[in-house]
Image: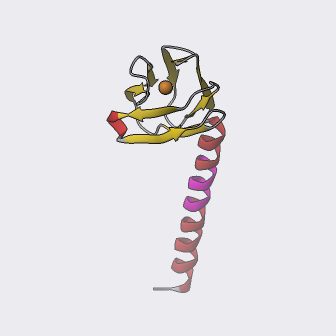
Amino acid sequence: MAPKDCVGIVRLFIFSFCCFAVGGFFAALAAEHHTVLQNNKSFDREEIVIAIGDSVEFKNADQVKHNIQIQELGYNSGIQQPGSGSSLRFDESGRFKVRCGIHSKMKMTVLVE
Ligand SMILES: [Cu+2]
């Protein structure tokens, strides 16, 4: 391979890498962080609509322990002490049912579009 060809390939590689990095940077900038509160043994809303790549923090603003379970993702936050939160990023579209393993009436939906 002639040295000239090598330079071309290296340039192309660097250019591709830069495009990828810049694209990732803007995707990360566009991602939003949402907060859902757990209070009075309920979530503060029945549904939240977010975009792919967004994250949701489920924050325990209650006086009692809570828990977050999302069966579709095989996710379980474990016990959430009052004042603590669990953050989760949603990387695929879909409708995800969120439940509290301690209070069976606590239910909400995360709709990822
Ligand atoms: Cu609960």
Quadrant of residue 7 within the rendered picture: bottom right
Q: Is residue 113 visible?
A: no
Say left or right for 73 vs 83: left
Q: Is residue 21 visible?
A: yes
**What residue do we see at 47% from left, 41% from top?**
77
In this view, the residue in front, 6 or 55, is 55
Toward the front, the furthest residue is 64
**What residue do we see at 41% from left, 36% from top?**
92
Q: State the scheme by which the image is colored.
A: secondary structure
Q: From what the image shows, is residue 72 above or below residue 2?
A: above
Q: Is residue 65 magenta?
A: no
List x then y, in percent, for residue 55: 56, 36
In this view, the residue in front, 101 or 26, is 101
- The rendered magenta stretch, by its main secondary structure, is classed as helix
Say left or right for 27 vs 105: right
List x then y, in percent, for residue 48: 51, 19
Q: From what the image shows, is residue 46 above or below residue 33?
A: above
Query: What residue range appears in magenta?
Result: 16-23
Location of the N terminus by quadrant is: bottom left
List x then y, in percent, for residue 22: 63, 50
**What residue do we see at 62% from left, 24% from top?**
62
List x then y, in percent, for residue 69: 41, 34
Location of the C terminus by quadrant is: top left
